[in-house]
Image (cartoon, rainbow, N blue to C red):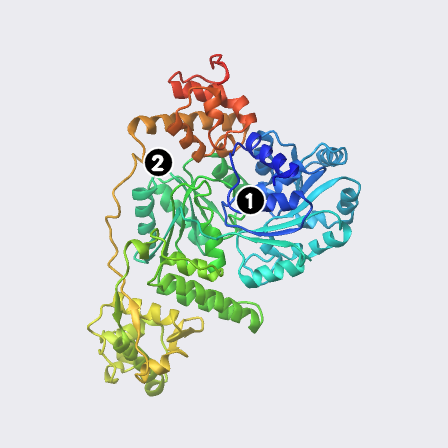
Amino acid sequence: MITASLESARTVLSEVFGYDSFRGEQEAVVEHVVAGGDAVVLMPTGGGKSLCYQIPSIVRPGTGVVVSPLIALMADQVAALENLGVRAAYLNSTLTLDRVHEVERQFLDGELDVLYMAPERLVLPRTLDLLGRGSIALFAIDEAHCVSQWGHDFRSDYLGLHVLADRFPGVPRIALTATATRATHAELTERLSLQDARHFVASFDRPNIEYRIVPKDGPRAQLIDFITTEHPGHCGIVYCLSRRGVDQLAEALNARGIAALPYHAGLPQEVRAGNQARFLREDGLVMVATIAFGMGIDKPDVRFVAHVDLPRSVEGYYQETGRAGRDGLPSTAWMAYGLGDVVSQRRLIESGEGDEAFKRRSMSHLDAMLALCETVDCRRVQLLSYFGEDSGPCGNCDTCKNPPATWDATVEVQKLLSALIRLDRERDQRFGSGQVIDVLRGKAGDRSRASRHEELSVWGVGADLSEAQWRTVIRQALARSLVVSHGDYGVLVPGPAGGPVLRGEERVFLREDPAAKKAGRSRRGGPQGRAAAPIELEPADAALFEQLRSWRAEQAKEQGVPAYVVFNDATLYGVVEAKPASIGELGGISGVGQKKLDRYGEAVLGIVSGAGTSDAEAPDREPG
């Protein structure tokens, strides 16, 4: 039986947001919250979490209060809602005192559907007093994993949000996140006092994303080749571990004609804010960033996310790659990964702050990330398994498309372990991977001669493998704890899993890394600066799509909003496919709500018909 509240929610979905039906768990969440129930929602990035609180905020009496850690993005979130005809505002430190008073008045007078604020502002006595004098439809706690110390984005400001349960017992609360393991899920439930809430756990799968991890072989050149051959002119995000790496890589991309911006905590605030604003508003930009960038980025047309350094955890990797393809169109999660990543990450954990429990937890996160990198099975299966979800081979990751070969490396690992033992026992020496490989390959040098390594029984026992092959062996041995690295210099020693292999009790099969393919894929687009379509189009349709993108860019510039606030790429593709000839036909395309139909309908129809008219020049048409 369809309740009146659910019918109202469906009407809002269609008339305001322009969608014919809810996706996945959305309808169940919306119905539950509209009825006054508390909810914990785990849903992948791009899965439509925002609708789960925006629609109930509109349907229920009062204002929906959204708690978000993303002050820099609140203005764009509000602009997107206002473009749909939703009454929205935000309260944060960027506002003048007069504007703060105006927003507070709007809230108290019931003139807002949605009000955004940061957690540190919400728990202030003054804010709690303000909220107590108004009518609240619900509290939505976005990025709820930030309350969990098990998670990768812990923020102490979130710990104070438990006050909402006591202070506003009759107001429904909904906590939402896209990244939560079982431990994080349990902790956020407890810390936010949501033990009696209904839990909605959607699939974490993002089938439109192709996951690909390649061995490092000059990562800067590999990245440039990846972008220019597969994503020319597309919007993307590239993650680096260090600020220096960000600056150097952004400079290198620009030198190759790839428009790129840097983002990291070492840049002045106004530079970071300006670069983020440009990335959100302009087409075809690549943001090169540390993990300081990205949470809450709603830009739907990010076609790729690349990592040139190993992420610290699967949660971080999943959240960062999830910023690609939020519109559901084909996108790529690409990463270059090598031996140095393993050594440097372990060294950072060992030398970092935190007690032993924290370091053990960090090491377990890293081990899970290494397992994802080294798997010979479907990467998506491994990724979803980490979040407690069973699945089958996806057919859309590198290991499914090109299953890697494996080889029996038992003897080679035994040689490696023996070399480490001989160096330690007979020379009282420990070295990093470079010198160990020289010993195994019998490569003489000043250090080897000074230490008389040629006299060791293991000298040259691995001459049949190249230096690159030995680096692959050591990398995978580190990932499996057959060997471990210690100290600032990453010296290698036998690991806890090495004993049985050395004694011949266990065999080791390693992933065979093929030689890096320099040619890459054939170019799918024109010259850099003009985007290749993520969906293959006939020439005439591609031209129409470009016309629509250009018109959209002009509209966005005039309004001072991101282009996707006007229409996202998926909606433009819908227009290209349907080629509507009337207002009625245009209104049937996903993402075209009534407010956008009224505002942009005639201009879009003019472009489709070939008139190429602007808003002011659009011809009169009868509604379809």
Q: Which residue is mark 2?
A: 533
Q: Which residue is mark 1?
A: 26
State whether residue 365 is above or below residue 420: above
**Label 1 secondary element:** helix
Q: Quadrant of the N terminus?
A: top right
At x 58%, y 35%, the residue is 10
Q: Give residue 438's position: percent from left, percent from top.
A: 26, 73
Q: For residue 404, what is the image quadrant?
A: bottom left
The residue type indicated by label 1 comes to Gln
Q: For residue 476, what is the image quadrant?
A: bottom left
Q: Give residue 12's position: percent from left, percent from top.
A: 60, 33
The circle on residue 394 is none
Looking at the image, tell me whether mark 1 or mark 2 is earlier in sequence order. Answer: 1
Q: Give residue 281's position: percent from left, percent from top.
A: 49, 35
- Marks 1/2: CA–CA distance: 29 Å
Pair 1/2: label in front: 1
Considering depth in this image, is 361 or 585 the residue closer to the camera?
A: 585
Does 60 sit left or right of 255 as displayed?
Answer: right
